[in-house]
Amino acid sequence: MHEIVVVDDDLEPRNAHELITDFENGLSIIFENLRITSVFRLRRSGKGKYEIERIPGAKLPKWMEQIEDVPRVPEGVYECLHCGRRFPTDIQLSMHTKLHYIT
Ligand SMILES: [Zn+2]
């Protein structure tokens, strides 16, 4: 569960109401775009506080699973952090990495 605080208590009630409405609308658009409307729900837990809760049993959309399955660099392979090129030795990688700083 993640908590989000939207407004401080010292805002004028009318301004706070507008901000809250904008926040709820904005977040619902984000949820729709990310296709997570059926996976997470926004729950108001205080005057300007919300919690994002995962709906029990809801299946994560494919894109979220893909983020978790980021392919790891196999053992014995050295990958350049700048461009992703892979090398069989750390020496080759280090020589390659220098090129990024020269050019
Ligand atoms: Zn590189």
Image (cartoon, rainbow, N blue to C red):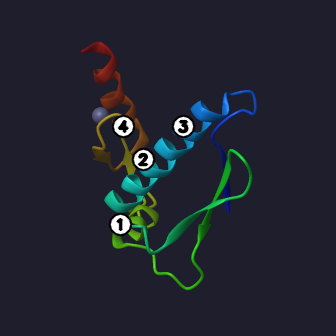
Q: Residue visible at 55% across and 85% down?
A: 57
Measuring from the top left, give residue 43's x and y in whole percent: 63, 62
Mark 3, secondary structure of its residue: helix
The residue pinned by badge 4 equals 93
Mark 2 sits near ligand 1, with its Cβ under 8 Å away: no
The residue pinned by badge 1 equals 35
Measuring from the top left, give residue 65's x and y in whole percent: 42, 70
CA neighbours of label 1 inside 10 A, class few (<14), some (14 to 19), many (20+): some
Tag 1–tag 2 contact (CB < 8 Å): no
Q: What amino acid type should be assigned to the residue bearing mark 4? A: Leu
- Earlier residue among tags 3 and 1: 3
Please tell me whether mark 1 or mark 2 is closer to you in this view.
Answer: 2
Quarter of the picture containing the N terminus is: bottom right
Tag 2–tag 4 contact (CB < 8 Å): no
Q: How far apart are marks 2 and 4 (CA)?
A: 44 Å
Locate residue 81: give its quadrant: top left
